[in-house]
Amino acid sequence: MSTLIVLLPPRDLAVPLPEWQLPDLPFLLLDKAGRTQRTGRSSLALLPRASETILMVAARDLLMLAATVPPLKGPRLRQALPNIVEDQLIQDPQTCHIALDPEPLGGGRRLLAVIDRGWFRFICESFAAAGQRNVRAVPVMRCLPQAALVKAEAAAPALTQTGASGDGAHVGADEAETTSASAVAMPVVAAVLGTVAPTAPALLGERVSEPTDRVPHVELAIVRGLYGEGLALPAAAVAPTLRTLAGDAPVKLYTLSGLPGREPHLGSATLPDVAKLFPGAQPLTFETLARRACDCRFDLCQFEFSVQPWRLDRALLRRLRVPLWLAVASIVIALIGANVQWLMLARQRDAIRAQMTALLFNAFPKTTVVLDAPDQMSRQLQQLRVAAGELSPDDFLSLAEGLARSLGSVPVNGIAALDYHDRRLEVMFKQEVKVDPDLGKRLARNGLAGAIDSSTGKWTIRNAQ
């Protein structure tokens, strides 16, 4: 099963919903054995097809937090989640999509990922329209080489996110939780994933030239244990921000390298290399980031965004339009052909019946009613043979004569009884007479058919024709 991993850009707040578009996306294509087949950057419509598509959602678009979740499932859980996180959001929680980490934290607490529902729906529908059916979305923070992965709330108190999300719609946690978190030195892993690339001027067809001496803004993804956040800030402010967020905890910084092409930008070919802005950071290749996405089990496509291969959407119906028309045309042609053949056979049957009836009337003009022409013809011929003095093959004398020729080594006085009725002869041999097995074959040579009743030992003989 081939796998396509795609890195999504963060949502640009300057672009209204009707004008949302996805730029060229970096991707990595793996075959079913995990070997790299292709890597590059392509528009959504030209992305290679794969059995599974994994989307790495930008860090700035997600808010990850821990909360106590009631033991509910399905639609009831989906209705309860907005009420759980509404105190930590500025945006209306009803307009957010909330996904749950499959691994519980203990004590009824679960890790939640919050994203703007409109933006996430746009992403899922865009990939579905492009032919990517089996889509899975994972947080890009979970794809970073994390320094510590703490799964218990006692070992890692819940750290509330303080960075700005893609919709700018959440605030910090209460002071009590922050004070509790500060007592534990949580290692921090950060990664610079590229420069900030606004897409609003590109949609308007403008070209913006950026000064060469300007320090660019960068996309920063931060991971602390199970929690992650995304920031967009000047490159010079990365180090102070990480020191402030980490406190006494160790910090490890990565820079994304090997990214196919460049991030979408507007005439900014003179932007400095991100890796040169952070000489002490370790390189993180795009292929490594993508392969770690394959191991992430936190799928954001839950509830109404869950993969349903049986769902017939417009994109699937559009692709199946020609096969469906061919199937319907084949069924119609088959039905027409079957009815035409039935009509032809019916006409042939009626013609044969008319021919047999005419033959019966020609041979026996006095026939008044025709019910079964072949049977009536046989009975009329039999009556003529009897009237002419000929024996019928079903008569007693004919059957008895054939039996006498077929007895062979069986003595004639060995017959105990003969019974004739319904044009068949029933023969009962004496108990002391042994009938040889070849009697049936001798009857067949004389035009008779014989069968023995194993329970009574009685033979039934009739005309074989």
Image (tube, helix red, strand yellow):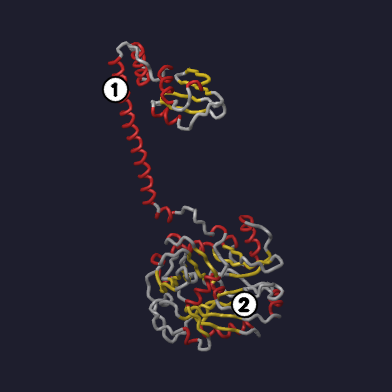
- Residue located 46% across and 67% down the image: 2
Which residue was labeled with disc 2?
Answer: 224
Of 357 and 376, nearer the camera is 376
The vertical placement of 166 against 379, above or below, is below
Q: Position of residue 10 (x, y in %)?
A: 49, 71
Mark closer to the chain start, 1 or 2: 2
Instruction: Please indicate whether residue 93 sits to the left or right of residue 23 in the image.
Output: right
Q: Position of residue 91 (x, y in %)?
A: 58, 65
Residue kind at label 2, given as amino acid type: Arg
Q: Position of residue 242 (x, y in %)?
A: 59, 83
Q: Position of residue 114 (x, y in %)?
A: 58, 66
Instruction: Please indicate whether residue 174 sits to the left or right of residue 446 in the image.
Output: right
Label 1 sits on a secondary structure element that is helix
Q: Which mark is residue 56?
A: none
Q: Which mark is residue 355?
A: 1
Q: CA distance from mark 1 to mark 2?
A: 96 Å
Of 272 and 407, nearer the camera is 407
Quadrant in the picture for residue 246: bottom right
Label 2 sits on a secondary structure element that is strand
> Label 1 neighbourhood size at 10 Å, few (<14), some (14-19), many (20+)?
few
Q: Are marks 1 and 2 in contact (CB under 8 Å)?
A: no
Q: Residue furthest left?
A: 362
